[in-house]
């Protein structure tokens, strides 16, 4: 995961700061899923293979809309990672790097693509129902203290927000979206909620994909490292202990010595297992990042198998050559290489690894 973080920073160094951060979550009620499950009377959780395959198709279409069809503007680069919730539903975190001519630098520009308000039910009933179904947080706080997001009596996601007449960018580089006190409300879990509980969204994407799609503006240097670490934070882990139960029941309290007896585990949901069985990508990025390695003289890495003969290994070019040493050699042979640092070298020259076999 550290390498993926550094890959993201390399892309950022090449094309600039990311502009949009999108979280796309699978909707188990998509017609494509329900059509396959309805005839056999199964729930979405019973068929993680269907969940994974339908979400993969939806995600590929979303990525195509953003990068190839330029739905939000010309895209120079992107990064994504696929994660899986405890209940098994997959979701994607996507960072979008836009072309300088298609950025959204001002609050009014942000309002053109991101909304944090409940639409008017009379003028756009479809969008109103989609926001009500997919983009309302909670309710939590005083209205529902038992909500899963509540920690120490407060919402861990900082909802409900404050009313905000206009969109602004705070001193830490995070946007504070427009949330007007305009009287628009929805009924959620028997509680009336207003714009303060709306998760920011893009109307076009929400209307097309009919799922939770959170969109955040993020073109500020102070938030970049946080975003890259969040996107590449890695998989869930648990520490479990197995102890004997004297009376054969599971109700007896046991004292667990976590130092002496523990198992460090990964939590893999059924959907993640299916996703990996299908060999779907967990991470992706464009443009590609070449990871450069360096070493001291005579200390380059040499790879071989248990069955290789020592003479065969010593005859390999990789014993004396590497990408790092080739950069030095190119500086002697090619005048245009003399002005390129090691990190810029791969943008003008290609290191052919086949000759080293």
Image (cartoon, rainbow, N blue to C red):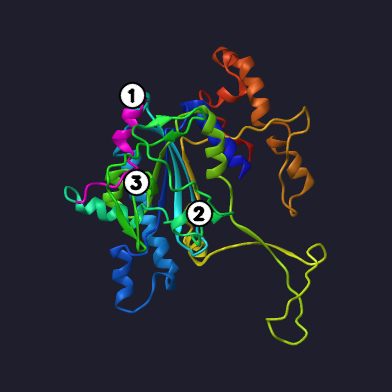
Residue placed farthest to the front in the image?
142
Q: Estimate the x, y position of residue 256 in percent, counting from the top left.
A: 78, 69
Q: Is residue 99 left or right of residue 222?
A: left
Q: Residues within 10 Å of mark 1 (few under 14, many from 20)?
A: few
Q: Position of residue 29 (x, y in %)?
A: 33, 64
Residue drawn at the location 49% of the way across and 58% of the way down = 279
Q: Quadrant of residue 215?
A: top left
What is the spatial separation of the Cα atoms under label 3 and label 1, in whole angstroms? 31 Å
Kindly tell me whether residue 303 is visible in this rendering.
Answer: yes
Number of residue marks: 3
* Range of residues picked out in magenta: 106-121
Query: Where is mark 3, residue-wise?
Result: 195
Instruction: Report the front residue among 15 and 345.
Output: 15
Q: Which residue is mark 1?
A: 101
Residue at the spot 76% in from the left edge and 79% down from the top edge? 244
Can you tell which mark lies on residue 83?
A: 2
């Amino acid at each position: 995961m550290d390498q993926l973080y550094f890959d993201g920073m390399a892309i950022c160094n090449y094309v600039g700061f990311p502009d949009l951060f999108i979280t796309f979550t699978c909707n188990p009620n998509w017609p494509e899923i329900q059509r396959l499950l309805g005839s056999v009377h199964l729930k979405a959780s019973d068929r993680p293979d269907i969940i994974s395959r339908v979400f993969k198709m939806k995600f590929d279409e979303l990525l195509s809309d953003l990068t190839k069809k330029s739905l939000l503007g010309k895209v120079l680069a992107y990064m994504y990672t696929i994660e899986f919730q405890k209940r098994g539903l997959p979701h994607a975190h996507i960072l979008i790097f836009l072309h300088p001519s298609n950025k959204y630098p001002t609050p009014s520009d942000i309002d053109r693509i991101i909304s944090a308000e409940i639409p008017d039910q009379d003028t756009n009933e479809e969008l109103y129902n989609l926001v009500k179904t997919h983009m309302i947080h909670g309710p939590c706080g005083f209205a529902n203290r038992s909500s899963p997001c509540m920690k120490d009596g407060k919402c861990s996601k900082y909802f409900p927000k404050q009313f905000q007449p206009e969109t602004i960018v705070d001193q830490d580089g995070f946007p504070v979206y427009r949330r007007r006190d305009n009287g628009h409300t929805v009924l959620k879990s028997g509680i009336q909620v207003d714009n303060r509980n709306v998760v920011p969204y893009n109307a076009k994407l929400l209307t097309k994909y009919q799922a939770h799609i959170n969109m955040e503006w993020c073109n500020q240097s102070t938030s970049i490292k946080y975003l890259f670490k969040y996107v590449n934070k890695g998989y869930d882990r648990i520490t479990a202990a197995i102890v004997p139960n004297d009376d054969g029941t599971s109700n007896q309290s046991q004292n667990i010595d976590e130092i002496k007896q523990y198992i460090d585990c990964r939590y893999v949901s059924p959907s993640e297992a299916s996703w990996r069985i299908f060999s779907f990508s967990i991470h992706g990025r464009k443009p590609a990042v070449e990871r450069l390695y360096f070493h001291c003289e005579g200390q380059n890495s040499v790879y071989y198998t248990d069955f290789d003969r020592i003479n065969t290994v010593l005859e390999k070019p990789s014993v004396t050559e590497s990408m790092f040493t080739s950069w030095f050699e190119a500086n002697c042979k090619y005048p245009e290489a003399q002005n390129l640092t090691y990190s810029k070298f791969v943008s003008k020259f290609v290191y052919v690894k086949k000759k080293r076999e």
